[in-house]
Image: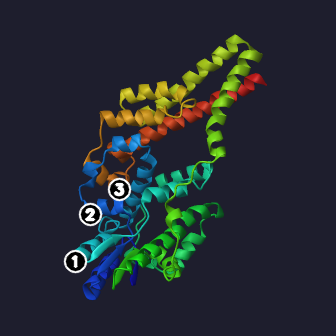
Amino acid sequence: ITILGTAHISQKSVEAVREIIGTEKPDTVCVELCKSRMTSIQDAEHWKKLDIFKVFKERKMYLLLASLILSSFQKKLGKGEIKPGDELKAAIDEGNKIGAKVVPVDREIQITLKRSWGNVGFFSKMYLLSALITSLLVKEDVSPEKIEELKSDDALKDLFSQLPPRYNSIKEVIIDERDKYLAENIRRQAKDSKKIFAVVGAGHLEGIMKHILEDQKIDHLDEIPKSGIWSKLQIAILPLFILALMGATFYFSGFEAGTELIKEWIIFKGTLAALGALIALAHPLSIILAFIAAPIGNFNPIIKPGWLAALTEIWMKKPLVEDFEHIADDSEHFTGFWKNRVLKIFLVLLLPQIGSSIGTFLVTWKGIKGLF
């Protein structure tokens, strides 16, 4: 088994993959891809087949957002000369040329993202989401020499050691669990193959070497953690608190004060959600629906102003293939977020939600002050 640690935006990594496969002639080539990512890499027109409406319906929008942002960030580092995963595509192409079996050995990306997302609290999620979105604005040039440095053990250890302790659970899911997963799947290929060549990110190399000499139980690593009782209770706490506040206002301050609080709830939340949609330059129908959905959203987990506005936006102005292809370039300019239909959908998703949340805080605070 030969394992090559690569940088996903490195020209030298692409050249090394081609050289090793051409020289060693392995009968099996393993790549750090899951089945769905391997399909998208092999199919140059996969964006044409993506049903973004279905992505929303299945509530996978945040997973798509994270994938697009990370891909966009890597593309920026590569300056467009090397696309993210080009060394993996080279491994697939070269493996097919010599008739080798090409095997995706990574865990499905949706499972990895769901397991990591489920392991952090609310404020950590908000921090991570803001950090991901901020990364779209990064314009720093990274030299080829710096990219090659990132393949060294010392640089990677230093990078991971800088993560705050509260994110250890994310590192465990994204790095440590996948080290075991990759090692075991590469190891299993040895049962039917005499010569194996595996291409993985340099960050996984040390972990794979640690686990590859012995069997690993990995079935449990495909499981998505179920929500605990506390997570389910959290969904109900805020609506119950708001209803209790409105009831207390009617009881202690009178009918007029209670009616006024409900009016403010509708006006503040609706207006701020609609303002968010307006800032995103959403379609007029999206703005109206954001206004209507915002006062109801806290009491109905299905009706959310951002989601409803974004779904309407997709229906009115479905993204084009070139919108997906130009995400990295368009995100470098402030106006690109409104020009690119994919980025604009995320604005329409996020800004009404933020506006509605601000409205919740303002009206709740005013209601509490009115009681005391």
Determine whether, in the image, residue 52 is placed left or right of residue 146. Answer: left
Mark nearer the viewer, 1 or 2: 1
Q: As drawn, is 228 to the left or to the right of 346?
A: right
User: Which label's residue is closer to the chain start, 1 or 3?
Assistant: 1
In the image, residue 248 above or below residue 20:
above
Identify which residue is drawn at 29% across, 63% down: 41
Between marks 1 and 2, how big is the CA–CA gap? Answer: 16 Å
Of the numbered discs in the image, which one, if any, rests on residue 328? 3
The residue that mark 1 highlights is 99
Q: Which mark is residue 339?
A: none
Residue type for callout 3: Ala
In-image side of 117 versus 142 (left or right): right
Mark 1 burial class by Cα count in 10 Å: few <14, some 14-19, many 20+: few
**Where, quadrant-wise, is the N terminus in this rendering?**
bottom left
Residue, far left: 97
Instruction: Indicate the amino acid at tag 2.
Output: Gln
Residue linked to disc 2: 42
* Circles 1 and 3 in contact, beta carbons < 8 Å: no
| Residue positioned 76% across, 23% down in the render | 371
Q: In 3D space, how far apart are the residues under numbered discs 2 and 3 (Cα atoms)? A: 20 Å
- As drawn, the residue found furthest toward the bottom would be 23
Q: Nearer the viewer, residue 16 or 191?
A: 191
Secondary structure, mark 3, is: helix
Q: Is residue 335 visible?
A: no
The local secondary structure at tag 1 comes to loop
Q: Nearer the viewer, mark 1 or mark 3?
A: 1
Judging depth in this view, the residue of 112 and 270 nearest the camera is: 112
